[in-house]
Image: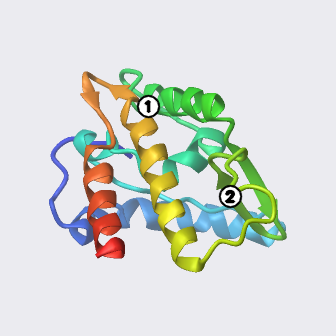
Amino acid sequence: MIAEGLPARRLERYGWLEEADRAVEPQLKALWGRGITAEVSVILKTPEEAMRITPLYLDLTEDAYILYEREPFLSSILERLRERLKALGAQRKRQGAVRYWDLKPDFRLGEGDQAVTSGEMARADLSQAEDLLREVERLPVSGLELGDSLISGSRRIHKAARG
C-alpha cells in the first residue's frame, strides 16, 4: 500500500492495519478450513519510498495484483522494471521450492579452463553488481533517476572489499 502521511516508524504504520486484520481474519480462516491457502501481505510505503527499486519489486513484476490506484504510480514503476528485466534477458528461476532471479544469464566469469581465485570471483561479482545497478539507475520514474543510493552503497562495499 502506498500512502502519503504515513508515520515515519514502521511499527506505527502497521498499527493502522490492526482493525483491517481483525476484519479479514475470519474470512481467511474459512478459506483455510476449505483447504485454500490464502494470505494477505501488506507493505506500507510512502510515494518517495516506493520510487526506490527494491529486490521485492522483481517478484512484484510477475506476482502482484494492483487492486486500486488513483493514478498509475506503482504499475508504471513495475512496467518500466519489467521492460528493463526483459532488455537484460533476466530470468526468474526455480530450484525446488525456492524461486530466484538470474538478472544476467549470459554473464560468464573467465574463459575456458582458466582458474579463478575466490578473491577474483568476489571482485568480479561486485563489478557485475555495479554494472547491473548502473543499468537499473537509468530507469526513470517521475523525473527521478533510480539507483543512486544503490550505486553509492555498492561502491562503499566494493572499496571495502578491495581495501
Q: How many labels does the image show?
A: 2
Residue at (49%, 27%) from the top-left corner?
80
Is 87 on the left-hand or right-hand side of 151? right
Identity, as a three-letter code, of the amino acid under mark 1: Ile
Q: Residues within 10 Å of mark 1 (few under 14, many from 20)?
A: many
Residue nearest the viewer, comparing 23 with 127? 127
Residue nearest the viewer, comparing 12 with 82? 82
Relative vertical location of residue 149 with respect to residue 29 in this rendering, above or below: above
Residue nearest the viewer, comparing 109 with 149? 109
Separation (CA) of disc 2 from disc 1: 35 Å
- Residue 110: numbered disc: 2
Please state the horizontal and vertical placement of residue 114, each as a whole percent of the image. Answer: 73, 65
Tell me the residue that label 1 is attached to.
Answer: 77
Q: Residues within 10 Å of mark 2 (few under 14, many from 20)?
A: few
Indicate the quadrant containing the C terminus: top left, top right, bottom left or bottom right.
Answer: bottom left
Residue at (40%, 40%) from the top-left corner?
134
Eye-nearest disc, 2 or 1: 2
Identity, as a three-letter code, of the amino acid under mark 2: Gly
Residue at (25%, 62%) from the top-left corner?
13
Residue nearest the viewer, comparing 117 with 14? 117
Image quadrant where residue 83 sits = top right
Relative vertical location of residue 78 with respect to residue 109 in this rendering, above or below: above
Query: Which circle's residue, 2 or 1, is located before the other in the chain?
Result: 1
Is 28 on the left-hand or right-hand side of 97? left
Residue at (27%, 42%) from the top-left corner?
3
Please state the horizontal and vertical placement of residue 126, each as a whole percent of the image. Answer: 46, 61
Relative vertical location of residue 7 with respect to residue 80 in this rendering, above or below: below
The kind of secondary structure element at disc 1 is: helix
- Residue 114: numbered disc: none
Please state the horizontal and vertical placement of residue 65, each as a whole percent of the image. Answer: 59, 39
